[in-house]
Amino acid sequence: MSEKMKGSNNQYTSKIFNVQLHFISFLTYSLILVFGLTLGIMISFYLKECTFSLQFTQFSIPTTQPLSPPIAVKQERVGLKDFLKPPPIMHDMDDEELLWRASVAAKIPDYPFERVPKVAFMFLTKGPVFLAPLWEQFFKGHEGYYSIYVHSNPSYNGSHPESPVFHGRRIPSKEVQWGNVNMIEAERRLLANALLDISNQRFVLVSESCIPLFNFSTIYSYLINSTQNYVMAYDDPSPVGRGRYSIQMLPDVSLNQWRKGFQWFEMDRDLALGVVSDRIYFPVFQQYCKGSCYADEHYLPTFVSIKFWEGNSNRSLTWVDWSKGGPHPAHFLRSDVNVEFLERLRSKKCEYNNGNSTNACYLFARKFLPSTLSKLLKIAPEVMHFEHYDGPKKQKLITKI
Ligand SMILES: *[C@@H]1O[C@H](CO)[C@@H](O)[C@H](O)[C@H]1NC(C)=O
Ligand SMILES: *[C@@H]1O[C@H](CO)[C@@H](O)[C@H](O)[C@H]1NC(C)=O
Ligand SMILES: *[C@@H]1O[C@H](CO)[C@@H](O)[C@H](O)[C@H]1NC(C)=O
Ligand SMILES: *[C@@H]1O[C@H](CO)[C@@H](O)[C@H](O)[C@H]1NC(C)=O
Ligand SMILES: *[C@@H]1O[C@H](CO)[C@@H](O)[C@H](O)[C@H]1NC(C)=O
């Protein structure tokens, strides 16, 4: 029994020994397992962080090489750069797409980046800007403070040599006829294209026969500091005013809302946005202001007087001579252009910003024929104090405005 017991005891101790052995190896395995697991988790976290930081600092490094050491070269921040870049001037958006895109506006009024406000000069022309050499002198040295857009008749093939500031500034254009509503379509197209550049703050419509009456810094300050828009609007009770109204425009436009004014306007970004996104009044004009109604003399004056009258000065910044009568203003020839004539246009008294008097009533004048160019080039830079007409020696940039 005792032997049996012994034997069994022996068996028992060896069993216990076995169990202990198993336990120890189990413990060892467990420890190794826990250690391995921890190591694994740690490595995977490290790798994740590594690829994470790689994704953030190295845009060009594909994430399939997460183990390559971080490269010290600092990539330039993109931020809003891509978003703010205007599309190419010769884009392929149709009018509907263009107007929609131009009507997109920020709700937050402050800009989270440095924005130098620009003046958009929108040339509505038949063919070439034949006074381009004069404008060239006017713009010289003020890069970054203006943008140029040209809408010319599509049949004009651009064979006229383009001067540098106008080079590549033609926007996708369509046929325009004098007095036709498609003139307004062209103006809206110009405004929409100019709105795509977030820096453009003031928008001025000029023609190929327009000239500036002051130097760039004077015009720039005048416009940028202005609290008003310059859309000419008045009530003309005659047959060529109220007489062009159609009762079919009711209920959107009534006779006492009907206004007249000429086409050459200047406006701020807010009004420009209002014009490109008008879906009520413009269709009424498209439908009921045809032929001898002359939409270009009534659409903007009426629209602005209904919706934006508060900020409007009701006058134009572009001088023209209607004194000779007839449907077109007077043309000026080479023999009409002299220093006294230009000085006279430069010194008319006007109200500026609702109350202050200014000597600069008109900033632009028309209609100057191509023959005036050489004479203008000779006398205008001096009369108008163009900053750079004397060559590079006199160069003085507007540094901070
Ligand atoms: C432009 O059109 C005129 C005729 O209208 C033609 O004589 C001229 O060669 C054309 N120029 C170009 C660059 O196509
Ligand atoms: C606007 O007017 C203020 C005060 O008259 C002047 O300090 C500022 O330079 C003007 N801004 C521009 C763009 O001319
Ligand atoms: C412009 O005309 C409108 C009427 O159409 C008038 O309410 C507004 O006061 C005028 N603005 C100025 C500055 O004269
Ligand atoms: C006239 O200009 C002065 C600064 O030159 C300005 O303080 C004042 O508010 C202006 N008046 C009006 C009515 O805008
Ligand atoms: C711009 O013209 C104004 C007069 O309109 C003149 O006082 C000013 O000095 C001119 N600017 C430069 C830089 O010549």
Image (cartoon, rainbow, N blue to C red):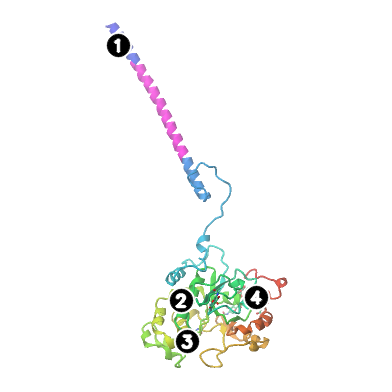
Q: Earlier in the sequence, mark 2 or mark 1?
A: 1
Residue 83 appears in the picture as rendered: yes
Asked if the beta carbon under badge 2 is closer than 8 A to the nearest atom of ligand 3, the reply is no
Q: Relative to the observer, which residue lies in front, 132 or 66?
A: 132
Q: Which residue is mark 2?
A: 275
Side of 333 where 150 appears, left or right: left
Q: Which residue is mark 1?
A: 8
The amino acid type found where label 1 is placed reads Ser
Q: Earlier in the sequence, mark 2 or mark 3?
A: 3
Does the magenta-highlighted stretch encompass residue 43?
yes
User: At 49% from the left edge and 45% from the top edge, which residue is drawn?
Assistant: 51
Q: Relative to the observer, which residue lies in front, 83 or 201?
A: 83
The amino acid type found where label 3 is placed reads Lys
Find the residue positioned furthest to the left: 1
* Magenta range: 15-44
Q: Which quadrant of the frame does ligand 4 lie within?
A: bottom right
Q: CA distance from mark 2 to mark 4?
A: 31 Å
Q: Earlier in the sequence, mark 4 or mark 1?
A: 1
Location of the C terminus (image quadrant) = bottom right
Asked if the beta carbon under badge 1 is closer than 8 A to the nearest atom of ligand 2, the reply is no
Q: Relative to the observer, which residue lies in front, 263 or 108?
A: 263
Find numbered disc 3 in the image and state the secondary structure of the residue it sits on: loop
Q: Earlier in the sequence, mark 1 or mark 3?
A: 1
- Neighbor class of circle 3 (other Cα within 10 Å; few <14, some 14-19, many 20+) is many
> Where is residue 152 drawn, in percent x and y?
52, 77
